[in-house]
Image: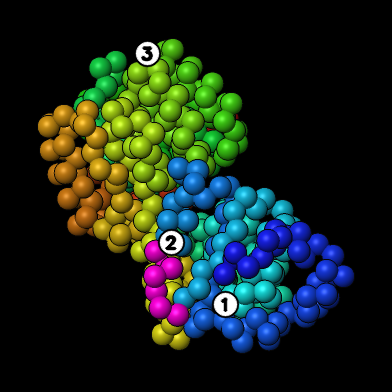
Amino acid sequence: MTARFTLNRRELLKTSAAGAALGLASASFPISRAFAAAATVGFIYVGPKDDYGYNQAHAEGAAALKGIEGITVVEEENVPETVDVQKTMESMINLDGASLIFPTSFGYFDPHMLAMCAKFPDVQFRHCGGMWNKDKHPMNAGSYFGYIGMGQYLNGVVAGHISKSKKLGFVAAKPIPQVLLNINSFLLGARSVDPTITCQVIFTGEWSLAVKEAEATNALVDQGIDVITCHVDSPKVVVETAAGRGAFVCGYHANQSPLAPEKYLTGAEWNWAKVYKMFVDDLIAGKPLPNFTRGGLADGFVKMSPLGPAVSEPARKQFDATLAEMMKGGFSVIKGPLKSNKGAVVATEGQAFAETAIELESMDYLVDGVVGSTA
């Protein structure tokens, strides 16, 4: 359906004159809606759909809906976290008759998605993240997310077996709680293999900044680090740079094994197809859509990339055994006795926090063994 419009959606709605010429003066658009399928679902991405990362993972989830009878999928990529995303959402509603929209990037939520929720109270909006709060946000809004720290723990298990230097590397965007949890989980997974392993983290300061990501990866390899993972929007640069320098890599967001077939060990991936199908099933059935949706490996919200050819048999055995434990539910990555890398006690003996624990939602520390700063 998107192919019918040769103009960028945001350009199309920039002026009221252009909107009036196309009959876009009001929030309703009866001519378009007359041709709408049973339901039209919109997806908006902050970057390209083929970025081997965050946006590709969502696009793969959207693609899983395209074979469902009665569902029309409309998409737009490379939409910045500005008023542009409001224009994109409005055009999906007015031009395509979208009744459910997934603005996938973190910065789309406030004020942009919330503004559209108020303007279009009959349209449902669901945002990727945990920002929706029933006490202050509208009921036609909501959020969804996955417990992917367990995937990074599994990355660490494999990395711990493969590393000869016993020094791991992590290229991260910003020290927010989810990123810190991923860094901590990666190291703790590796330390389940060898408690002496350390992890050096470098923060780039941006979700997508290829030059700094390449510089950080090269700096890690220069320190003798031989396994690297990351939390940036597109791991492509990190994976290709690390593999090009002879280091092994663990992926994130999506499957990056085609980028480094011999050096890719495994990866923590989102399985948004499962989540988006859940929402669409409810939409078709006329059921209320949940406002707060989360799940982990056991729920099918997260999955792991296939193990690569360099993964040893002992690593495979521990990976499989740990994954089996996680699939039972209630697996704790953060458990005592455990200190931060600044010496503070974060978990006492016998204390354990599953990834669903509210205590982890405000994580502001890196665990002992991580070389880096949250400042």
Question: In the image, which disc is placed on residue 224?
Answer: 3
| Spot occupied by residue 325 in the image (x, y as percentages of width and height) | 18, 50
| Spot occupied by residue 319 in the image (x, y as percentages of width and height) | 19, 40
Front residue of 317 and 245 = 245
Please determine whether, in this image, residue 170 is positioned above or below residue 231: above
Sequence-earlier tag: 2 or 3:
2
Please determine whether, in this image, residue 20 is positioned above or below residue 253: below
Amino acid type, mark 2: Ala
Q: Is residue 64 magenta?
A: yes
For the residue labelled by badge 2, is the local secondary structure a helix, a strand or a loop?
Answer: helix
What residue did someone put label 1 on? 99
Q: Is residue 126 magenta?
A: no
Q: Is residue 364 left or right of residue 33?
A: left
Q: Residue at x 57, y 26 (%)?
A: 212
| Foreground tag (1 vs 2) | 2
Amino acid type, mark 1: Ser
Question: In the image, which disc is placed on residue 63?
Answer: 2
Residue stretch rendered in magenta on the structure: 63-70
Amino acid type, mark 3: Gly
